[in-house]
Image (tube, helix red, strand yellow):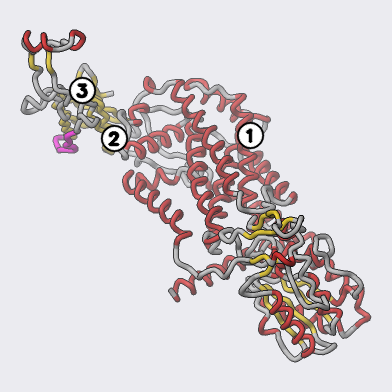
Amino acid sequence: MKLRATLDSGSRQAYRHLEHGFDAAFDAANPWRHLGALAFLFLCLVLATGTYLYVVIDTSVLGVYRSIGDLDRAPRSLGGLMHSLHRYAADAFMLVTLLHLGRELLLGRYKHFRAFSWLTGVPLLGFAFVSGVVGFWLKWDQLAHFSVVASAEWLDALNLFGVPITRNFLSVATVSDRLFSLFIFVHIGAPLLLIFGLWFHLQRLAAADVFPPLTLTLGSCATLLALSLLAPVASAAAADLSLIPAALAMDWFYLWPHLLMYATSAQTLWALAALLAIALFLLPLLPGAALAAAAAVHPEHCNGCRRCVEDCPFAAIVMVPNPKAKTQLAQVLPELCARCGICAGACPAASASRASGFVTGIDMPEAPLATLHRELQRGLERIGERGVVVFGCGQGAATGQLASAEVAAFSLNCVGMLPPSFVDHALRNGAAGVLVAACRPGGCAFRMGDRWTAERLTGVREPKLRTGFEPQRLRLVRADCGEEETVASALAEFRRALEQPAADNKLSTRMASNV
Amino acid sequence: MSDLPKYLAQALLYGAFALFIGVFSSWPPYHQLQPDQALIKLSIKHHGKLIAECRQRSAEELAKMPANMRQAADCKRERSPVAVEVDIDGLAAYRHLAEPSGLSKDGASTVYQRFVVGAGPHRLAVRVNDDARIAGFNHQREEAVTLVAGHVLVIDFQGEGITLQ
């Protein structure tokens, strides 16, 4: 277990280094943080170009190779580009989908409240493979012949069919237009099922990024277009069922299972596919750390404002009629709750400066805001007027080691749990400054914590941070887990700047750009 | 990072992505057979003979039956398994007894096997028995064939007997 934990930690750190490297070039449009949305973008490209191809190609046995050949002979015409884009977008879709799955697996995002998205995502991989592989058959070239025979041999190994499917591909006489109608049906039907499955896949995600950021969308589309222009896709020679070509230009994104089958056996490939599917489906059931208690609503303080509903990243809160008032009441669905506390950070009732004592409409039972409020009070008394308050994220860079005589450091479940009133309270009650350490843009383990925090602190999202204090007294720093040094450096610089009022404008600008 | 290096880095990474997609969409090539090899496919789908002789019903038996069900012959549904043997260049390459499909064993027996052989002349001997009531093989064919590299020869068993195509 210890070895596994070490390996997990090591591989996650290595992955984060990779992700951070891309941050330098892409900022918030880092493709690693938008893999699911990128996959959907490529799927849309495949659907759009596929619709065009369906209109222009002849889907008969004799006509399909000729009509695709016509497109290939003019690779930079509209039809030729559509053919190349269709293929490259499909390849990119599979690559990005596999990376998306691998990323979620590596980051351990398949259990508890994420199990539904994981379990509804796994079958989509099957639909993607079926659709992609059958797409190769439709070209009816040598590669199609190889793939269709290999697939038929694999299916026949199950002995489920009265007539072996392979007998359909023994000679030209057995291949009919009706068979191609079946190919078309599967090639179109599987993506439709995939899209239907995607709807389920995203059900438990609030404000899901269906498409990547505009710059990433444009960059990705331009990249595939440039690839299609520079290296147009070409079909192999026409399928000849009596010949096996000396070499096949293999598509390694979809057709590698055929090679695995010929290197082992059809039964082995079935066994591996079944084991992989079982393993992926059982992953959410693996034992792991128990979850803390779900968020709890305090009905007497909930005014039914819906902000927690709107901010919950996993759609775990619904509104129900309040039996004791005419307003509505928030209700947490515990099985969907991520225990992030972002709902508590959204609650306008969580005022840190209320004279009658701290209350909140929704809170985390095992890490309540009331406790944070008490500790903040004590911390403010301890650090004095030169002191700085640091609010950190339990999933991001650790901030505990920053505590000192003049620094009070607090770690929350997620930085999104921080009500802006706590920042305001700290600034109005003695702290020279407040530093909020959030994860890098898009790097929040709970999807939205960093984004909602930045928007609340800059006053574009409720609950907004009250104004009336010098903006240079607040600093937002972005640092993921393992980037503790970044926070420490930012804190040191922040403290120096707080002692130099002349640098106000510069600091203010920096804070805005950080946010 | 100022804007220019950022855009250059983006261009480089987009280029690497395109290169990865472009390269692995068609490379490295796959060689299903070595340059001096050919393929023989044995593919048979055949209903074996009925496993037992039909019994003729007597007039008394027929009289007891409903008029619409009076079939003179009483035949079992089960069919014979199909035994297949293939020798290539005098060596036993395949021996198989294909059971009939279906819960009542009244469906077709199927056989599918691939043999990768060297290109050039070969002597093929194929033997089939589709009748459990007789010993040995009731269908056989021997033939010298010359296979060019990459050629696919299909051995089938149709109504007219064993075919090579």
Callout 1: helix, strand or loop? helix
Q: Residues at marks 3 and 1, common chain?
A: no
| Badge 2 or badge 3: first in the primary sequence | 2
Chain at tag 3: B
Residue A457, by quadrant, is: bottom right
Residue A279: image location, x then y, percent: 42, 56
Task: Name the one closer to the observer, A198 or A221.
Answer: A198
Location of residue A356 with respect to A340 vertically, above or below: below
Alpha-carbon distance for marks 3 and 1? 47 Å
Callout 2: helix, strand or loop? loop
Residue position for label 1: A49
Amino acid of disc 3:
Ile
- Disc nearest the viewer among 1 and 2: 1
Q: In the drawing, what numbered circle is on residue A5?
A: none
Callout 3: helix, strand or loop? strand
Answer left or right for B51 relative to A120. left
Location of residue A26 with respect to A68 vertically, above or below: below
Which residue is rendered at x = 18% and y = 37% of the image?
B94
Of all residues, the one furthest to the right in this rendering is A502
Alpha-carbon distance for marks 1 and 2? 43 Å
Q: Is residue A5 visible?
A: yes
Neighbours of disc 3 within 10 Å: few (<14), some (14-19), many (20+)? some
Which residue is rendered at x = 53% and y = 49% of the image?
A120
Residue position for label 2: B119
Answer left or right for A511 relative to A259. right
**Span colored in magenta:** B90-98
